[in-house]
Amino acid sequence: MGVNVLAFATSPRRHGNSETLLDALLGAMAAEEGVTVEKYALNEIEIQPCRGCNACEELNRCIIDDDDLDWVLEKIIAADIVVMASPVFCMGMCAQAKALVDRMQVLRSRKYVLHLPVIPAERQGKRLGAFLSTAGQDWDYVFDALIPSVKCFFHVMDIKNRDISYLMVNNVDKMGALAAHPTATTDAAVLGKQMIEEIKTRLAGEEREMQKGDRTEARDKQAGTEEDRKTEPQRDETA
Ligand SMILES: Cc1cc2nc3c(=O)[nH]c(=O)nc-3n(C[C@H](O)[C@H](O)[C@H](O)COP(=O)(O)O)c2cc1C
């Protein structure tokens, strides 16, 4: 059974603290059988800020057609696990991460204005999300302000709050501070492994349901054949 993991490293500082945390998670995920991991650094692709035009309410796509959103959205929809890593910038997520969150407005329009499915019914509940973050300050509440935006990001792509995992490490400011943290990378690796186990269980449930569906269909066909035989007009021997 294949598992597709899609990850976004959103910090403008490549290979900094949040991306190092992300890499520990993704490394553990990739080590599991059948897992494909794709990571994109938002600093290296182009996701422009939302223009707030609401054209997506009619077009079912974003009016901005000269950046990378379209293929990113396709990958978000196809993924079994979506992961975002962002540093705390001025008590929120960094601008690159927020631009991606805001551009998910296309999915919100699809879902709530156009009443179209975002994810097919059979994949509902079979997707997981994770949000990783790092902050320089040691305040306990340093991550609080960005959580509602994270929930918003996952909500519009049909990943429920209960299916979002969080790993947030404060008091890591300088480049390399995360790698020197006593537990952070191990915690990320443990979370990565747990998430793969969880998604495999859910996807196996889906396969079992599909197999059950196939058996039911075969039984129905068989019953149909027998029913057809019973109702088949008998040959009139006298004709
Ligand atoms: C523009 C900017 C704003 C920041 N604002 C905060 C903040 O409000 N609170 C905090 O704890 N750390 C803040 N930091 C520190 C970063 O969150 C911290 O260094 C983080 O680990 C950086 O992760 P990165 O290396 O992945 O970019 C800020 C850093 C920058 C560059």
Image: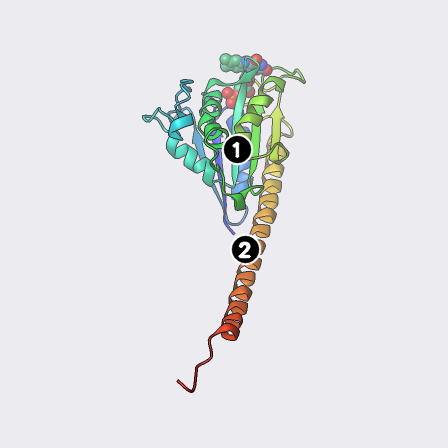
Q: Nearer the viewer, mark 1 or mark 2?
A: 2
In the visual, does 216 lie left or right of 43?
Answer: right
Q: Residues within 10 Å of mark 2 (few under 14, many from 20)?
A: few
> Viewer-proximal residue, 6 or 176?
6
Asked whether residue 214 appears in the rendered view, the answer is yes
Asked whether residue 31 appears in the rendered view, the answer is no
Residue at the image position 43 percent from the left and 37 percent from the top? 75
Q: Residues within 10 Å of mark 1 (few under 14, many from 20)?
A: many
State ligand 1's quadrant.
top right
To which residue does mark 1 refer? 83
* Quarter of the picture holding the C terminus: bottom left
- Amino acid type assigned to the residue bearing label 1 in the image: Val
Q: Quadrant of residue 212?
A: bottom right
Residue lying farthest top?
A: 90
Residue at the image position 57 percent from the left and 14 percent from the top? 91
Which callout, 1 or 2, points at the residue further toward the start of the chain? 1
Question: Residue 210 — which label?
Answer: 2
